[in-house]
Image (cartoon, rainbow, N blue to C red):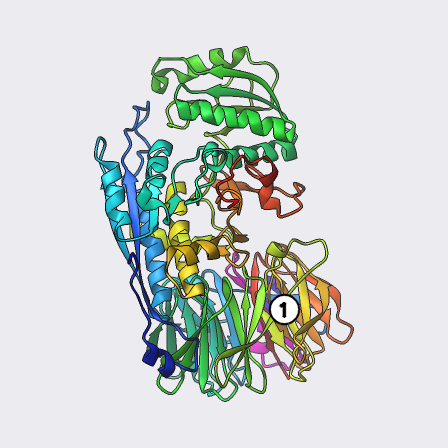
Amino acid sequence: MRILWQITGLAIGMGLSIATADEIWVSNEKDDTISVIDIDTLEVTRTIDVGERPRGITFAIDHSVLYLCASDSDTVQVIDPETGKILHELPSGEDPEQFVLHPDGKHLYIANEDDAITTVVDTDTRKVIAQIDVGIEPEGMAVSPDGKIAITTSETTNMAHWIDTGTQELFANTIVDQRPRHAEFTHDGSELWVSSEIGGTITVFDRENQQEKAKIEFEIQGIHPDRVQPVGFEMTRDGQHVFVALGPANHIAVVDPKTYEVTDYILVGRRVWHMAFNGDESLLFTTNGVSGDVTVIDVESLEPIKSIKVGRFPWGAAYRPTN
Amino acid sequence: MFVRVIANYLVILWFCCSAAYADIAVTIGYLEQVEPQPPVLSNLDPIPENEGLAGVEVGLKDNATTGRFLKQTYALETRVVEEGGDFESAARELLAVTPFLIVKAPENQLLRVADLPEAAGAILFNTSAEETGLRDAACRSNILHTLPSRAMRTDALAQFGVRKKWTDWVVIAGPYPADQAFADAIEKSARKFGIRIRERKAWDVSADMRRSAFQELPLFTQDFPEHDLVVVADETDDFGRYVPYNSWVPRPVGGTEGIVPVAWDRTVEQWGAAQLQSRFEKTAGRSMRPVDYAAWAAMRAIGEAVTRTNQADAGAVRDYLLSGKFELAGFKGRPLTFRTWNGQLRQPIPLVHPRALVAQAPLEGFLHQRTELDTLGIDEAESACTAFRE
């Protein structure tokens, strides 16, 4: 893999134009690397060395750079996706685990897992502009599409903390079930969804009044409910599906966001954690931590079509268009 | 009033848009009886003095952080009674200010406090007494156990033996009552899971093993019948450390030495446990031990009940803890709940060696109609505990 990358790098360096396919970038928590998957061939084309314990991974809005939480290096690394080189680092507070990029493209909201803090960093000036006290073990991060609200969920405090991005202060704290892991606003911004790993649920909040609107539970034949542990999830733009990773249950649940009903379960690799769509959302890539691979799901048929070996303990995934 | 509950209705109205939380101040008592430690051969691993209390302190911080967002505050009152001190008076003092007591004390002392008239409506959390009897005929309705029973631990080892097909065991038991109790629990677990105890031998060697383990142990183990595992029952950590690698035939060691079933250990790092470990290490300056974990879990259980019910009276907390709604994220991969028939916190049991987690019970394949966690320890049908039936 490394040789291939060098050749590709060389070719780019020589100014040759190569038609490259879109990519999925996967952070490998226990390898300190990123695996880059070519979406056309569904193969790993590059492996990039990064900082220690890479977890949260996201591209800039224009995809010009990649932001990566290097948790044990206590930094957010900014990486050139063409060369794989680390351009610079952002001050992130201690042990950054997850983050979310504000729609202004400028502010990163970072969960500092060991410090019970959410750090807000300006990616232009590379300065910390605010630190907000939240609950213990902050992890899930979300921002509303209009950019007015940021969310941090805290795993041991079992809350979603609602941050007013105008003042960088908390304006509400809502309790969810045990060990919240991930949060997302719906694409229209009207709802906030929060997954609870140990509680085994997703709580849906009405954004307007922060009241609980629905609770989604999961049930898989032959797997004890204790082991059905929702973690990462993603919503399709067309509002048809929400895909929910169920951790050690080794399945992805498919939820109808209109009825809050689970419509399907898809078998994937072991300890499925996070996921990313390709550009037209025809494919979904899930990171399977324990089996060390990525399952590719065909969104139309809801069938797994391939599994791709990546590094040790793949954690997060992000989509990069190249054309 | 044991607990001060102030409901400020104006505040509730003002915070109309999020859930209505009243100001609640909860005091939690920590009660410890310092026990004499019998002399042991090696001084390599002293028992930390603040074992238990350190877990309480980390749990208190966890509760306080959550409480901050809900107008709930938590305070700790501590009584550590030295050897020969007046334990009952200390207990009464605490019970006068709070119905929530986290207790580190031997079985008889714990029972004495539980039976005080002042403790009638209280909740005592047992964090250090492993005696299975406390979860059985000697149970009390006002004691909840966050420390696993000895039976839960030995059942975990037996499941491991079955899975590995290491089904013939020999036992070396030390002279102390706790050693005997551990060896008895091993025998009971062996019967439950179909393991043969080929021989049980009392440890009676008085030589200093630091010098002579290499000579003494092969002799001591030479006449054991054929076996797969040497089980050591040495709860005081006296001779067990000299058994591995010194047996007559090459066999793995388990029990209180070698592969050990525990409530908690520094090697547990899965399921987000690394976070709890690092929080604990930051506070205590050492790694978290089983009694610390049980004390932390007790504190967090109280916190969870107060958070979810928005009440701080003992009756409401007890009802919630024993209801189907309570679950504790205990960093062991699945929610922890209380057994409603004897007040024992259901929990997985890590099987560890000094440098890594080997496996975690319940092991795959051991099934139960309620939850696999109930394959560990006394089950409802065999429990002689009646105090929880009222």
Q: Which residue is mark 1?
A: A244
In the image: residue A264, left or right of residue B160 = right
- The correct choice, above or below, for A26 with respect to B153 in the image is below
Magenta stretch: residue A11 in it? Answer: yes
Q: Is residue A129 visible?
A: no
- Residue toward you, A13 or A126: A126
Find numbered disc 1 in the image and state the secondary structure of the residue it sits on.
strand
At horizontal 39% and vertical 13% (from top left) the residue drawn is: B205
Q: Which residues are magenta?
A: A8-35
At horizontal 32% and vertical 26% (from top left) the residue drawn is: B42
Residue B1 percent coordinates (x, y):
28, 58
Identity, as a three-letter code, of the amino acid under mark 1: Val
Residue A233 percent coordinates (x, y):
60, 71
In the image: residue A265, left or right of residue B188 = right
- Residue toward you, B30 or A233: B30
Find residue B20 and report its image quarter. Answer: bottom left
Q: Chain of mark 1?
A: A
- Residue toward you, A243 or B38: B38
Magenta stretch: residue B160 in it? Answer: no
Decide: few, some or many residues near mark 1? Use Cα within 10 Å; few <14, some 14-19, many ≥20: many
- The correct choice, above or below, for A95 with respect to A121 in the image is above
- The correct choice, above or below, for A183 with respect to B176 in the image is below
Q: Residue at the far right: name it.
A: A301
At horizontal 43% and vertical 82% (from top left) the residue drawn is: B17
- The correct choice, above or below, for A27 with respect to B207 in the image is below
